[in-house]
Image (tube, grey):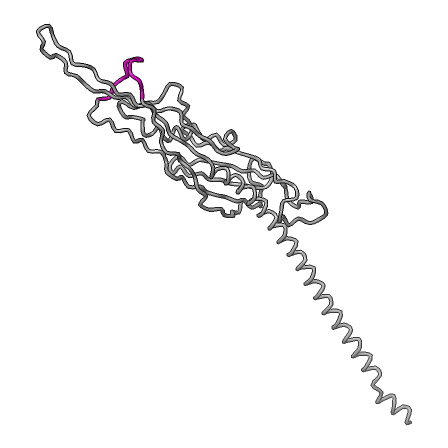
Amino acid sequence: MKRLRKKLHSERGASILLALLFFLVCMMVGASVLAAAASNAGKIRSNQTEQQKYLTLSSAIRLICDELEQAEYTGKYKSYEWTVSEKKDADGNVISPAKDYFYCQQQTGSYICGNLTQEIPLGPELDAIFHRQFAGKEGYGGADGLNLEDNPIIHTLTVTLPEGLTGYPYEGSGPAAYQVPREVTVQVKLDHGTQHITLKAWLGTGPYPPAKNDTLSAELVAVAPPVLDYSPTGRTPGTPPGDTVSPVECVLSPMTWKLNWIKKEAS
């Protein structure tokens, strides 16, 4: 009877049950911790990739912006001034008084852009913008063979970043262990209205930004655009009489560009 009473009041089963319950709770907590760690690891990897993309794009676009900040455009023109002497008849009467004339002729401007003068040939477009100050005005014109590009052109370049780029957060071994392409496509366009330069960059060498891929844009503002400063007061527009008139060659102050902003855009 005593043995039966001990079995009825025994707590061994409850202890085992509590132990199993505690073990189950520990398993659930451990699983939650592992899931959170895996999620955080994925987020860290994703953030590193996004950081790589941004650093790659910003490095490429800043490289082009640095060259464009060294760019200069100098407007040029020639001014002709001459006088036609008065004419008299046989009796000495003036039949045609002396008259002063002028002619202003635009020349091909000087354009340089650091190491990218050939890759970003903005000269004809800038000449066309400057030509607006000559067009439609009597006594003003362009030199023979003056190359004018009236429409904006998109100039496309491919920038390949060097291996082992300082501060580049790649994973893996070796300096070439990039997680995103090292090649970046950069488009450069001159706004003929504001004369500002805009850039757009994206990863890879495709002609268009890939789907679901970030792009980076930049703008450089024009500093001191060329202004025609010739003022032939009191002279009449005309056509220079052959080689008998020597022109005065005029060079304006250089026009430059300054970086205004760089920002990230979603394509």
Segment colored magenta: 236-247
Does the segment drawn in magenta span residue 240? Answer: yes
Query: x, y (%) of residue 119?
Result: 52, 31
Taking 97 as reference, is 107 left or right? right
Closest to the observer, 67 or 46: 67
79 and 221: which one is in front? 79
Question: Residue pushed farthest top?
Answer: 90
Could you say where residue 245 lies in the image, as x and y percent from the top left? 29, 16
> Residue 94, how many percent across, how many down?
11, 12
Please tell me which residue lies in front, 164 or 190.
164
To which quarter of the image does residue 79 belong? top left
Q: Is residue 256 above or below residue 110?
A: below
Q: Given the current orientation, which residue lies at the most extreme bottom position?
A: 1
Give the image quarter of residue 175.
top right
Residue 232 in the image, given as x and y percentages of width and height: 24, 26
Write the residue at 50% across / 47% down.
263
Q: In this figure, what is the number of numbered marks? A: 0
Residue 175 located within the stretch drawn in magenta: no
Residue at horizontal 89 percent and vertical 90 percent from the top: 4
Against 199, is 142 above or below? above
In the image, residue 236 sits, relative to residue 156, either above or below, namely above
Which residue sits at x=58%, y=43%? 211
- Out of 208 and 263, give the one closest to the viewer: 263
